Amino acid sequence: MSSSNPRQGSVLHPRGIAVVVESEEDRLVEESRQLIHLLGDSEENPHHILYFGKRGIELKTPEHIHHNGKRVDFSTIDFRTGAGNLSKNQPLPKAIGEHTTLVDATAGFGMDAARLAMMGYHVIAIEQSPIISAMLRDGLWRAEQNTEVREALGGRLTIIESNSTQHLQNIQCVEVVYIDPMFPPKRKKSALPPGHIQVLQSVVGYDNPEQTRLLFKVALTAATRRVVVKRPMHAPPMTTNPIATHNGKLVRYEVYRPTPHTK
């Protein structure tokens, strides 16, 4: 199913984000009203602008308010038959395996979730940030207006705004839970992460290690087949004894078996 669900337990952001609406499109006006209600009055000197305009919902900086900003755009994925972006020989789909139902518990801008949906997985993408969730809903709506992207997604991507730790405790019949925590960079100097990750980090910050461990623990009881955790190469394993590890160039995907007594 390719739909977006209303917020279910989202979290508020720290101050520093202003909402600017220059659209009369009903869906965008309603979305902006809900966010303004959540975020409160606009900041006088915001770090970011959440802009509602002709391109949909964009995240901008005040100094670039008249330029295109960051938006969720699933049409940028190369979804042609046989394209490398959708190859199941990549580390992540190898870690997921031949299972068909998946929860992406840390959706972010949703590109992993969209790629996996285009590969044929049925994906529930959970994001608790109201700002990023609004951008996801907008991106999915625009994708549905594009015949090629809509057909590539095949109705297999659902977006839910919620706290994943809470939501997973009430979910049923999901084979795989995928967790991609937002880790801080290594202490020593290194290349900056890709631009979209920098943007995401600047808005939502880094994940709390204790909250990530709790999410992992809950995921082990929610999944019926496996839990997949994305880790930087320099980081230690999430816990001992993964049943498999699939390495990429900069990250690895650790595979864990669900807690036995819960299945």
Image (cartoon, grey):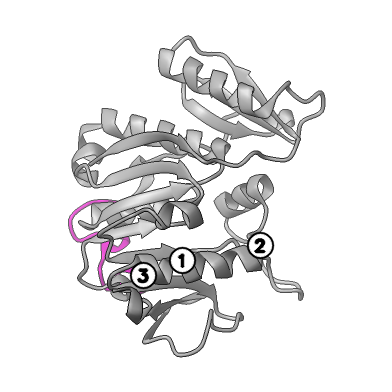
Image coordinates of residue 20 in percent, x first then y, are: 63, 20
C-alpha gap between disc 1 and disc 2 = 15 Å
Task: Tell me the quadrant of the picture where the C terminus can be found.
Answer: bottom left
Can the viewer see residue 66?
Answer: no
C-alpha gap between disc 3 and disc 1 = 21 Å
Sequence-first disc among 1 and 2: 2
**SS for tag 2?**
loop
Image coordinates of residue 70 in percent, x first then y, are: 55, 38
Give amino acid for label 3. Answer: Leu
Instruction: Classify 10 Å Cα crowding around label 2: few (below 14), some (14-19), many (20 and above).
Output: few
Q: Which residues are magenta?
A: 78-93
Can the viewer see residue 204?
Answer: yes
Which sits in the foreground, 50 or 204? Answer: 204
**Mark 3 = which residue?**
92
Give amino acid for label 2. Answer: Asn
Residue 218 badge:
1
Viewer-side label of 3, 1: 1
Residue at 63% x, 60% y is 207
Viewer-side label of 2, 3: 2
**Mark 2 = which residue?**
208
Q: Is residue 194 left or right of residue 18?
A: left
Above or below for 60 versus 76: above
Above or below for 114 versus 101: above
Give amino acid for label 1. Answer: Val
